[in-house]
Image (cartoon, rainbow, N blue to C red):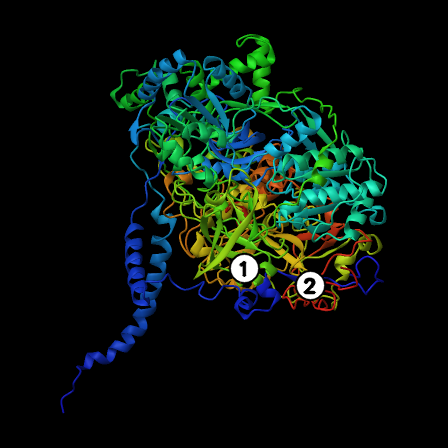
Amino acid sequence: MAQTFPRWTLKIPLFLALSLPLFAAAAVGGVWYYFSPEYTDVGYRPKQPVPYSHALHAGQLRIDCRYCHASVEQSAVAVVPPTKVCMNCHHVVLKESPLLEPIRFSLASGRPMQWVRVHDLPEYVFFDHSAHVTAGVGCRSCHGPVQEMVVVQQTEPLSMGWCLDCHRDPGPSLRPLEAVTDMEWVPLEGHAEFARQAIEERGIAPPTDCTGCHR
Amino acid sequence: MARSTAAPGAWEAPAYWRSLEQRADDPRVRDHYEREFLEGASEAPEGLSRREVLQLTAASVSLASLAACRRPVEHIVPFVQAPELMVPGIPRHYATTLPFRHEALGLLVESHEGRPTKVEGNELHPSTLGSSSLWMQASILDLYDPDRSRALLAAGEPSTWEAFTAAWGDIAAGLVQSGGQGLAILAESFSSPTLARLQRDAQERFPQARWATWEPISEANAEAGASRAAGVALVPDPHYERARVILAVDSDFLGTEAGVVLATRRYAASRAVDDASPSSSGMSRLYVAEGIHSLTGANADHRIRVRSSRIGAFVAALAAELARQGLGVSAPASASPVEGVSAEQLRVLAADLLAHRGESLIVAGRRQPPVVHAAVLELNAALGNVGRTIEYRIPRHRQESGETLAELVEAMGAGRVETLVILGANPVYSAPGDLAFAEALSGVANVLHLGGHVDETAAASKWHVPRAHPLETWADASAADGTLSIVQPLIAPLWDGKSEIELLNLVAGGEDRSGYDLVRQTWSGLLGSEPGSESFESRWLQTLHDGVAEGTAEPAAEAPVSSGALQELASSPAPGGGEGLEIVFAASPALFDGRFANNAWLQELPHPITKMTWDNAALLSPATARTLGVENEEIVTVSVEGREIELPVWIVPGQADETVVVELGYGRTGAGRVGDGVGANASVIRTSRSLDYAQGATVRSTGRRHLVAQTQDHHGMEGRPLVRAAALDHFRDHPHFAAEMVHTLPPSTLWSEWTYEEGSHPPPGVRERVAVDVPVYQWGMAIDLNACTGCNACVIACQSENNIPAVGRDQVRRGREMHWIRLDRYFSGSEDEPETVFQPVPCMHCENAPCEQVCPVAATVHDAEGINAMVYNRCIGTRYCSNNCPYKVRRFNYYHFTKHTPEVVALANNPDVTVRSRGVMEKCTYCTQRINAAKIAAKREDRPVADGEVRTACQQACPAQAISFGNILDEGSVVATHKRSPRNYGMLDEVVYTRPRTTYLAKLRNPSAELAPPAAPGADPAHGATGGDESDAAAGGAEGHG
């Protein structure tokens, strides 16, 4: 009697035994990476109503972050500046630029600008800028090298695991308090010793409990 | 009862019961105590089969996964030009005033980026002293009521303010010529200097005009009584805190009378005991004589059941007894006995009052006629209380005396009113039925109505002007002690509303001016300087900032007493008993007179005594219900003088017999989507001659039933001494009675004990490398049951702070109400004359939390500071935690309750608290958002969080200051002091060893040693689930008395 199944089918179990684990590993790995904020969120760079360049303002002109993000040291939110702040300079500088038309329109009409949020945490997360800035965590730790970005993009995953990495070991992210907004600051040699002192002096005890951020 | 005299060990806890059904061990309610979720609580809504549910689930899953492919774009919308001083993310607090009838309630309102979100009391304001009432708390939801009137209406069609002012100009021109002939103004009561000024202006411009006042629930009797006795207009100002013996006759001063916040604060102060030296502790004694079962009666040490109509006779009999015992009052030598009051009770009460001359206090309630108030003033004067425990004040800035509603209706019926201006009142709904107000109104040519809603009256008016909410307007008010304060707006009128000041000014002055200008004009007179001058502006700004004008309080007035009221009271015949029952009209403890009917928080607030939500009822005593042959939830027709309404029956232990009590405020038809059709309108069967109680009511069963959503058996706990109370004498001898009530083996636990040192210390990784000295906090709460009066302010405060949804009548019936803090109400003793205890129950934040052990996804875990945290984004809705919670404080979102909330209502949400979604468990968090805000602020300033800096919403609202919260490691903190009290006990702690962080201070009562608490003959001791293991023998304590 002729064989119902050709001979090569005998190899199917072996093939499956070898490939299924690979496939499973790929699936797990794929979900692990492609479904994580590391993949989905990092690199998010939406188009803004005005092509505002941090590379120009913060990089070339070296305007301090706090000129625009004024409440970062007092409040949970750093604020995007009111239209009036833009016009403080632009009623003199580039006052005719067509790129700035939406800004001029906003001021003239009283209609607010609609900037697109780049660094967006879930609604059940309550992040406080002031707590981090006053502890000596630099802007750059979460926002990346903004002074080089023509279009602002997200450089860090801002996932809970990423937050906790620092909350469990804040040392590497700490700076001298006067260097928090210094985008070019690099850790000096012996940073570990500086960090140890800073943690002690500033009484840094970042919460790792759920209630620290979820309310 | 063996309470005050028993030897140690013989004293037993009374048996507590929550409902008559539980007392009778009715199998229908057993479920409530044995199960976490009611039968059917976890069923899908009716009308959906399992198949449909699966289809819907599949559909929503596929939609959800599609939606997840795109990241939602979120916008940041900054100001164009930032307002001064406003820092986004940091709430600002503004002092203002909530005018509530003639009261002025000082508020401190939290505003997030110009959006008011939370109301608290203003500590500087004498009417609130930083605490609040449930109505103050709920006023924020009223601001964002989606059913508020949004447009000016002319004959029901949308119109404009300009069109209205032009039309009014024409009418006014005619009126000015005739001196106001045919004009009538109907106002609510007020205490506003500006309104009082405008009223004078109006009467000057229109001397022929009528001015009438209508409040469905008014203080007119008390004021008339004081005026009668003293000859001048006076308002009583009782100082409960100075009294050792208090007698309240038909007065619910802790619940629905005027000035409850201050009264509760003062009363709680009089009840404070010294936990450090129990043997020398003293506290006041409260006697209450009343017919309805009020919140105040529930707090009484001795409650005497006297029908409202017999209160006058009771006061006369008391006066006679006082005279017999040697008090110099002009009372008749003997008075006829009052049914329900024994000679012994009168003798002891009189002796107690006499023994505390100058330290006793008698207050009468607003239902009682002026003569009773005058008689009470006479008694207070004779007892030497006037000027000590009770002061009298001259009312300022009230409306000049006007007509009553009945007189106005008569004029309307006679065709003498052509133009009627209604300033805020809603008489079509609230006028007594015998006046037939709506009919009379139809004969008036021009009706102009100012109101917050297109309500019953608006629908019958030619013009309707939307009324601005007090948080949207400029106005002013004066407190009971004369202190002046300004009402300043927190937000521009959402729907272009106008205030009564602006409208009355248009009527009185003929010109359209802003409320701001009008108030400043009044205040220039009050302050004696011109607006714009430096002295005016600095005073004005300081007053706005503080919320009170400093130094405007007035001293108490002299109250000369003329006698006569007692004599008259004694000689007045008892009201004709005749056929039928006595009917009493009471203010609803939630909706008041119906003005809050469209407030879902208040509709869903369980009634303090009946625990009913979303309904009013014909309240009957157990004996009367038996006589009538009716039972709970049976619909009856209540009729008075031929007018009738239909209501479900609800049986209230402790109510006077032969009496039916109906609460006002329900049965609205023009309130909005929340309030319409809830309950029945009791105004229909009110009569203008006897507004508050009447004889000759009949109650007849219709044979139909109405399912009442009540929560008295919800979240019932298994039988152990949950709530602990004892008499003051017993406490003096046995300070640790609360702990001694339960005898258990030394506790043992499977789990490791809590280590307090962990605190806020850095996480282990950091701790190993660096020694960081940071403040350690361990949060805890203590609730003093002796201070708590059961007023419910904490429930609404929590709802407002924590974005807790209202779920509706049907959901409440299924046991799905969402309140994070509930008030358990326990009765003990007989069903006719029970004692009542209240126990607020939030999450206990157990150190050995049973909920945490069973959560499969670690969605509920402890933080290092002792808070049992609920992580919404982890929760998958198994509800195991809730099943394992012995306190039944966890609440499950069976639906996405906020999904269809109108956008404007969402504005009331606290931005610091997550809005929960469907399928998620939630519960009290100790207001973790407030803890974190305080910790971050302290960290920024490099200091530890001070005691009292973190106040939970319930604590801040509590007018009795029953709740303390703070760091229990801080020896000097208030909460630590309370937890060291001998009265301190952890609920169920001895039994299940949960180590709750929220503990209770046991309640004390101060009954007279001579007057044993009454017990019904033959009353069966309850086999209640909450009674306690050894309780059966103790209930009631039927020793010889009676």
Can residue B97 be seen from the camera position used here? yes
Q: Nearer the viewer, residue A199 or B845?
A: B845
Q: Is residue B61 left or right of residue A127?
A: left
Q: Specify the farthest residue to the bottom.
A: A1
Residue A190: numbered disc: none
Number of on-image labels: 2
The residue pinned by badge 1 equals B714
Q: Nearer the viewer, residue B1039 or A6?
A: B1039
- Please state the chain letter of the residue tagged with numbered disc 2 in the rendered image: B
Disc nearer the start of the sequence (2/1) = 2
Dividing the picture into quadrants, the one containing residue B844 is bottom right
The residue pinned by badge 2 equals B15
Residue B172 horizontal/vertical position (percent):
38, 16
Q: Quadrant of the C terminus of chain B?
A: bottom right
Q: Nearer the viewer, residue B273 or B359?
A: B359
* Amino acid tagged 2: Ala
Task: Report the residue at 31% width, 70% height from top.
Answer: A20
Q: Is residue B272 left or right of residue B215?
A: right
Q: Are marks 2 and 1 on the same chain?
A: yes
Task: Report the residue at 42% width, 43% height from top.
Answer: B668
Residue B824 horizontal/vertical position (percent):
60, 55
Task: Report the residue at 35% width, 53% height from top.
Answer: A35
Q: Is residue B921 left or right of residue A83?
A: right
- Please state the chain letter of the residue tagged with numbered disc 1 in the rendered image: B
What SS does tag 2 mark?
loop
* Amino acid tagged 1: His
Q: Specify the farthest residue to the left.
A: A2
Neighbourhood count class around disc 2 (C-alpha, 10 Å): few under 14, some 14–19, many 20 upward: many
Residue B703 horizontal/vertical position (percent):
44, 62
